[in-house]
Amino acid sequence: MNKSNIFDLIPATLKDELFEEIISKDGLKIERIVSYGHTTTEFEWYNQDSDEWVILLKGEAVLSFENRDDVRLKAGDYINIPAHTKHKVSWTPSDEESIWLAIYY
């Protein structure tokens, strides 16, 4: 058994958002996402085939949804995003990392 820590091995700076797959098995995927002021581009929307449960472990963020109100998240907040719900990250702070744990199912 190998032990890991979700807060280890985080680069001090990132050109692009960091997506790291932790587990993927039988229709379940868990990944760590690290943002430093990263956002989804203006014309890009995530529109996934699976549901996504995501928790913000550290930092802050704003998620935007097509035809819905924005959702502001702080550390400890989580949200379940149904499949094919168009969404994007519209803000994360650039002076600290935002660390997400996303579960796709």
Image (cartoon, rainbow, N blue to C red):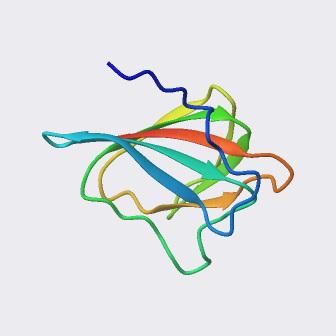
Does residue 61 lie above or below 94 as drawn? above
Q: Is residue 75 visible to us here? A: yes
Does residue 28 lie above or below 50 as drawn? above
In-front residue for pair 10/36: 10
Does residue 56 lie above or below 91 as drawn? above
Rendering quarter of residue 23? top left
Quarter holding the N terminus?
top left
Query: In the displayed image of the protein, which residue is found farthest to the right?
Result: 95
Residue at figure coordinates x 80%, y 52% from the top left: 93
Q: Is residue 70 visible to us here? A: no
Query: In the displayed image of the protein, which residue is found farthest to the front?
Result: 1
Question: Residue 89: x, y in percent?
Answer: 60, 59
Question: Residue 60: x, y in percent?
Answer: 73, 42
Does residue 71 lie above or below 75 as drawn? below
Quarter holding the C terminus?
top left
Residue at figure coordinates x 62%, y 67% from the top left: 16
Query: In the displayed image of the protein, which residue is found farthest to the bottom?
Result: 43
Number of residue marks: 0
Lateral position of residue 76 relative to residue 97, left or right: left
Lateral position of residue 22 relative to residue 24, left or right: right
Question: Residue 33: x, y in percent?
Answer: 54, 48
Residue at figure coordinates x 68%, y 69% from the top left: 15
Residue at figure coordinates x 32%, y 60% from the top left: 48
In-front residue for pair 50/65: 50
